[in-house]
Amino acid sequence: MSPSVPLQEMIRAIRSARTQCEERGVIQRECAAIRAQFRQTDNGGRSHNLAKLLYVHMLGYPAHFGQMECVRMIASPRYSEKRVGYLGAMMLLDEKQDASLLITNSIKNDLSHSNQYVQSLALCTLACMGSAEMCRDLAPEIDRLLQSANSYIKKKAALCAVHIVRKVQDLGELFIPAARSLLSEKNHGVLHGAVVLITELCERNPETLKRFRKTVPDLVQIMKGLIISGYSPEHDVSGISDPFLQVRILRLLRILGRNSESASDAMNDLLAQVATNTDSTKTVGNAVLYETVLTVLDIKSESGLRVLAVNILGRFLLNSDRNIRYIAMTSLQKIVGTDHNAVQRHRGTIVDCLKDQDASVKRRALELSLALVSASNIRSMIKELLLFLSSCPPELKAQATSGIFIAAERYAPSKRWHIDTILHVLTTAGGDVRDETVPNLIHLITNASELHCYTVHKLYRALVTDISQQSLVQVACWCIGEYGDLLLKGECQETEPVQVSEDDVLDALETVLQSHMSSSTTRGFALTATMKLSTRITDNVDRIRSIVSIYGSCIDVELQQRAVEYNALFKKYDHMRAAVLERMPLMERNSSGNTNGEATAETITETNSSKVTQEDRVPAPPPQQQPAKQTYDLLDLLGGSSEPLQQIPAAQTLPINTSGSAGGDLLDLLGGLEPSPATPAPSVTVYEKDGVTLTLSCEQQSDSSLAVTLTATNASESDISGFTLQAAVPKSVQLNMKAPSRDSLPARGAAQMTQLVMLNNPNKVNLKMRIRISYTRQGSAFQDMVQVDSLPGLS
Amino acid sequence: MIKAILIFNNHGKPRLSKFYEHYNEDTEQQIIRETFHLVSKRDENVCNFLEGGMLIGGSDYKLIYRHYATLYFVFCVDSSESELGILDLIQVFVETLDKCFENVCELDLIFHVDKVHNILAEMVMGGMVLETNMNEIITQVDAQNKMEKAETFIFQSTRQDR
């Protein structure tokens, strides 16, 4: 009776269950029976139970209670039980379980068993789930087995050694001599294992790589033997003699020949021979050819050989078998950096592959096309890519859009073309672009001042057609707000003039405001744009006023806030409205890393001249102007004190809302506008009261880190104890307070206390610090707070 | 390195699942489901390589699969394996199964899972290809089966003696 009959009965029972519920019931009964049997002592059917458990595990039900049983079975003397036990160990155990340590001893014993199959079971299990400790313990055993006479064991030991090297890199040294000697084996299995082992050793350790370079002639010899020798039926796969071994050797040659002239020379002939003689009508032939091509392109081969290799790849590209085309594109991707011109020759075929039905081929073609874009072919390539975008599978859209943007930015022949391209992408795939696109595009448009008229006409037309693509709508609203007067003038050199009336424009913006499809950010854009138009149009200001006041009671807090402020602008501050809403000046772009980790707008730093002119025209705006919802992180931290930020022209706060969260932006604005203190004195007294003096000095450690030293002295007549300092800094700054030197201050300045505070200011915000001082004097506790607005000694 | 070998049928039921890296049971089932989803959507005449499975480990890994009648054989490999080589390996695996089970069909795989595991253990070990010569594999598997049968026979005969 074969041991798996009870297993088959259980499988039949499970299969006959008609619903998932029934199946679960059957499995639960079986598991209960198995658990009961495990608790019993030795009986004949142990292996059946474990086999059943493993089947149940494959179906997805919990099977962890079988782990100890595996350990017991492995220790059993019977082969059938050992076999199932090891299989269970491979499936149920891993290095994180404690039970895996228990099998180390069994594996050790089995490795020296007289029966080769038992040895092979142990080797297999060790290679699959051996932990680092087990590998360390058993490595000498494996080394011994590598030198045994049995080729079956040798090949398994070789792969086990690979696993050991992967887990514990240092043990690689142990296997080098054995690996070397294995290369002279005749058995293909052993050779294969040896080549894999040497590959792994060379990849991990460059020293070993140098030592194995000497084996290149041996490897070349083996390959020649494989290619030239006559038909050998055991290793033949469709006419090629042991292609797996050939591929492995070629890969090893590639690693050995990289960066080495002498090794590469030795291989040149062989590679030429393989490349020309291999039959490429079957997949196996192509596999070997492919590996050869990769090797040729990676080592320092002679130019004739390289040309041959690229031609082979070109042939692959035209092959009707999609697999081959896929492979060809994968390898072209690898060499597009180094042999750019050679790959350019095949650009036409690659672009055709973009239209292939197969998603994998499309993906490869997209990556390769993006890599092939250059200044000379930018227009045609982008045209093809835009065509691709309209029929592209959804998982590739994001990659395609960002690739197109990057390429367009690098090689754009003209600003107008650039803007057109971005608009085209937004209309086709607006939902999949990244968040930074909107501010980037706005920045681009602002800087192309001669194209404002053209851009706003185009965007208006796009807006009227379709308001579902959020990025497009946001940009369109912003532009209409800024350049609405150009739109209404109606004439434009670059496109056909279209008569747009003020009502049409306001209708369009109102549609955006009221549509269900608009996100809250988009609505914000639209409302601000409507407001800006109040200075640019003449007749319908009342309409704008009514729109704005409607939104004063909107549920969305952000919109409500804006509407209320704009209302205020109409009512109380009408004299300032024109100045506040005038056109935005040219922006400089900061790198977008500055905003507290959110992928939002770039910060806008003003050039000095425009700042001055703004300040002239807008005298210190009263505090109500400032949108209180924009939490100045700094103020929040320092207790919400409403310091009037007089230096900031309110004009900038309104149109900057490119996306909802702007706290970080404002902080950077603060940083940009306040002049950094230029006090040469390194230390400054920040607090002086009741005889307690606190001084602060700074030292810039590096670009963003600062060391602040706080020194406290007590000049009064009574001692102070329990003196502690606490500090708070703006949100984006990291604070690290070191231990103070002492916590008591004796009277009359007999000793002072110092404390070091390390600040890390990666966003380069303006540093402020609020320090709380607490101490006990004559039995009564005392607390005070001081704010330091500018740290001295900052460069 | 081969990360996992999966065999499932046209409805997604797993017939063999061998993972060469440890995942917990829920993740394993999720991987099987996700792979089935990706593979079953493929047309008949597209290429056999798939990228884009998220669970099994990111951008370096791809799925190489072959569809035979009612079964999908899927190997999940990383970039150190030759893709065309793995395709051939799947072919060798299926041919070996065919020889061992005499015209193998899905039922054979269902009822003799342990035997399939043993054959696979002779071909792929620890995520690396061990032996690709069909005859060699079959010889070893036969020898091991004989050993097992001999043991059972001895065991049974000693039982009868009592």
Image (spheres, coloured by chain):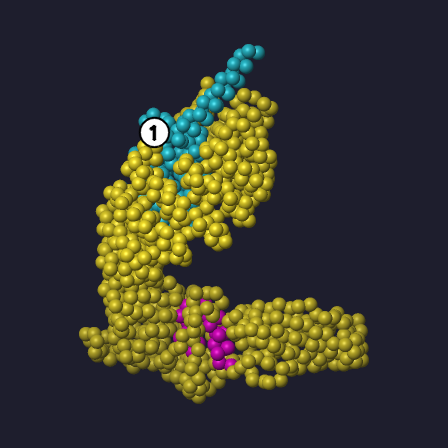
Chain colours: A yellow, B cyan
Q: Is residue A667 left or right of residue A514?
A: right
Indicate whether A103 appears above or below A255.
Answer: above
**Residue A194 occupies quadrant:** top left
Asked whether A166 or A222 is in front, the reply is A222
Q: Chain of mark 1?
A: B
Q: Disc 1 on helix, strand or loop?
A: helix
Residue A741: image location, x then y, percent: 72, 71
Q: Residue at 59% of width from left, 27% of height from top?
A: A39
Pick the quarter of the image with the N terminus of chain B: top left
Indicate whether B147 appears above or below A678.
Answer: above
Residue B107: image location, x then y, percent: 36, 28
Residue A478: image location, x then y, percent: 34, 72
Residue receiving disc 1: B98
Pick the quarter of the image with the C terminus of chain B: top right
Q: Residue at 44% of width from left, 31% of height from top?
A: B118
Asked whether A172 or A671 is in front, the reply is A172
Residue A595: tell me if it is visible: yes
Name the kind of residue labelled 1 in the image.
Asp
Asked whether A754 or A319 is in front, the reply is A319
Magenta stretch: includes residue A241: no
Q: Is residue B146 left or right of residue A732?
A: left
Highlighted range, magenta: A652-674
